[in-house]
């Protein structure tokens, strides 16, 4: 028997708030149940394990992140700005009430030497979405260099997210400037190749 949508929202809200701020390992399932105000029996009707709940919270977070990124892309004035919109989206997402101290996906991956399958899949989906979107956005500007540029931008995005652990007041200014420099280098190289 499935759980009601309102109960699921309470569970995912509690999981998101606790797992992605205090840590998955440091958060007992009882703390999630208490914060959500639901019973263990209710939880396990919807999620067979703590890891399944973490994966569901990650999937919901990814959808929210992609909505924020889509909005940033829509506001972009040029193809270059569309590529760099990922940094606008990172800044917008960070300022949200449900924004975490740093990336929930990086944090979840870092907690496990060998992540459970559900969590590994959620992290892999997020990584693929980042890589694929960056490549697709870059292709009109750099053509066949788009895949290489996407890998470089993915590294910059990940580094920017990790820097939030060193300084919670950091913003995306430096990461965006580095990304723009790399984007220009790819554009010049593409022109030279032509």
Image: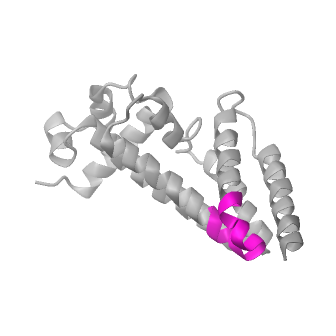
Left or right: 55 with respect to 187?
A: left
Residue 34 % position (x, y): 29, 30
For the record, the magenta segment spans 134-149
Nearer to me, 29 or 5: 29
Q: Is residue 46 visible?
A: yes
Q: How many tags in the picture?
A: 0
**Residue with the most extreme front position:** 193
Magenta span dominant secondary structure: helix
Q: Is residue 57 visible?
A: no
Residue depicted at x 59% and y 65%: 133
Q: Answer whether residue 140 is magenta in the image.
A: yes
Q: Quadrant of the N terminus?
A: bottom left
Nearer to me, 21 or 122: 122
- The colour style of the image is one colour
- Residue 83: name its quadrant: bottom right
Residue 53 % position (x, y): 30, 42
Residue depicted at x 70% and y 53%: 153
Residue 76 % position (x, y): 74, 70
Residue depicted at x 15% and y 46%: 45
Left or right: 13 with respect to 169?
A: left
Nearer to me, 58 or 37: 58
Residue 168 % position (x, y): 69, 32
Q: Quadrant of the C terminus?
A: bottom right
Residue depicted at x 60% and y 67%: 70
- Residue 117: name its quadrant: top left
Left or right: 28 with respect to 181?
A: left
**Residue with the most extreme top position:** 26
Q: Is residue 29 above or below residue 151?
A: above
Q: Answer whether residue 23 is magenta in the image.
A: no
Q: Is residue 34 above or below residue 54?
A: above
């Amino acid at each position: 028997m499935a759980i009601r949508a309102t109960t699921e929202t309470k569970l995912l809200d509690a999981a998101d708030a606790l797992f992605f701020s205090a840590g998955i390992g440091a958060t007992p399932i009882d703390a999630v149940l208490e914060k959500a105000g639901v019973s263990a029996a209710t939880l396990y009707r919807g999620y067979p394990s703590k890891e399944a709940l973490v994966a569901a919270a990650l999937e919901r977070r990814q959808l929210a992140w992609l909505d924020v990124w889509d909005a940033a892309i829509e506001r972009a004035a040029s193809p270059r700005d569309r590529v760099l919109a990922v940094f606008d989206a990172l800044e917008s997402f960070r300022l949200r009430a449900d924004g975490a101290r740093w990336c929930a996906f990086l944090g979840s991956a870092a907690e496990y030497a060998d992540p459970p399958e559900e969590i590994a899949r959620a992290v892999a989906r997020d990584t693929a979405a980042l890589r694929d979107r960056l490549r697709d956005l870059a292709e009109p500007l750099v053509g066949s260099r788009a895949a290489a540029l996407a890998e470089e931008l993915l590294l910059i995005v990940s580094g920017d997210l990790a820097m939030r652990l060193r300084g919670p007041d950091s913003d995306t200014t430096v990461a965006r400037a580095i990304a723009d420099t790399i984007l220009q280098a790819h554009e010049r190289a593409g022109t030279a190749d032509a």
